[in-house]
Amino acid sequence: MAEPIHADATLQTTPLHEAHVALGARMVPFAGYDMPVQYPTGILTEHSWTREHAGLFDVSHMGQAVLKAADGSHETVARALESLIPADIVNLKPGQQRYSQLLDDTGGILDDLMVSRPLDPADSGTLLLVVNASMKDADYAHMEGRLPAGVSLTRADDRALIALQGPSAADVMARLAPEAADMTFMASRPMTVAGFACHVSRSGYTGEDGYEISVSASDAAALWQALLADPEVKPIGLGARDSLRLEAGLCLYGHDIDTTTSPIEAGLIWSIQKRRREEGGFPGAERIQREIRDGASRVRVGLKPEGRAPAREGAIIATPDGREVGLVTSGGFGPTVNGPVAMGYVSRDASAPGTELHLIVRGKPIPARVAPMPFAPHRYKR
């Protein structure tokens, strides 16, 4: 699950690095950072704790940035971003967040990202962005090279990002920031958490209810300790983060989505609002509108292998008579499901739920079937 880096590269650290080491975390290279893959209790325990209580994740390696229109107009900054992504940002309400993708000229996915419109009317010409750690430098360069005059991008490298996820997350947050309890899924707003000025969204990457908390890097360690002081909260590493998002059927950039995949192939049509589907005006719009109209030739599907052996990324997907129809892009053991789960791309004729397929693992075909996602139900607060 670690992303490869050159052996001589110097790993970056997040503001919480010392806290992870003090907790006995096993640290691994990931996206150029030294990150905790697990703590002493192990991945299975961390995964289950998040599903049953509240897990605390350091996601400070992610890229945070601010888009700003010089004229202070939401319309100006929203139209500028809409020229790069397929989501409807013009109609995004103050205090709301939206998921989208940064697209290349062929409709391939350069990265996926979160976009928030600040709640304060004084910030109406501003949008807040969160992008993937491994892609942030490329993303910023791509955006800066295409933004119109009068719209600027500023990196927020002085911010940390902490995620609190699980069914107890709302109660934990309510004790430290009472107004957090009234938020709904994909709402975002500034608030004081445990005495620290933060920007909070009700969202996350586990399928559970939860929050992502942006805080000054200088306050991150103290906020982390304040959250961990609650007995419902335990620290969770990248290993369980991956198994949680896989059970939730959520894409990991560089694995399930990249420049070879379109949002429609990836099953992300829900993230393209009606106005944008009809009007276009984003990179690769012609292809994406065609795939919406006619269907994509291949699609991302969930897969449930028989038995206990997981199929990993790169495993060939074939029909029972041996015809290759696709590849696994993510796979592993699903602790909540109590069995192996995977996702991958298959040709459209092999994508119907219940379709019987074989996953080729170490040269041996493992029977599997196409299964609806998510594998574990989403529990967002709507």
Image (cartoon, rainbow, N blue to C red):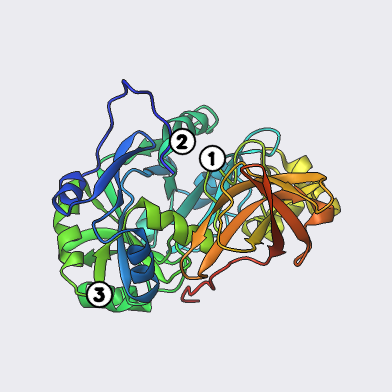
Q: Residue at 59% across / 56% down in the picture?
A: 342
Of badges 2 and 1, nearer the viewer stands 1
Q: Residue at 76% across / 54% down in the picture?
A: 278
Residue denoted by label 3: 232
Mark 1 Cα within 10 Å, few/some/many (few <14, many 20+)?
A: some
| Contact (Cβ within 8 Å) of mark 2 with mark 3 | no
Percent from the top left, x then y, of residue 109? 61, 40
| Contact (Cβ within 8 Å) of mark 2 with mark 1 | yes
What residue type is disc 3 on?
Glu
Residue denoted by label 2: 135
The residue tagged with tag 2: helix, strand or loop?
A: helix
Percent from the top left, x then y, of residue 142? 52, 30
Front in this rendered view, residue 276 or 358: 358
Front in this rendered view, residue 224 or 237: 237
Residue denoted by label 1: 254
* Mark 2 or mark 3: whose residue is earlier in sequence: 2
Q: Is residue 86 above or below residue 181?
A: above
What residue type is disc 2 on?
Met
Q: Residue at 50% across / 69% down in the picture?
A: 338
Mark 2 Cα within 10 Å, few/some/many (few <14, many 20+)?
A: some
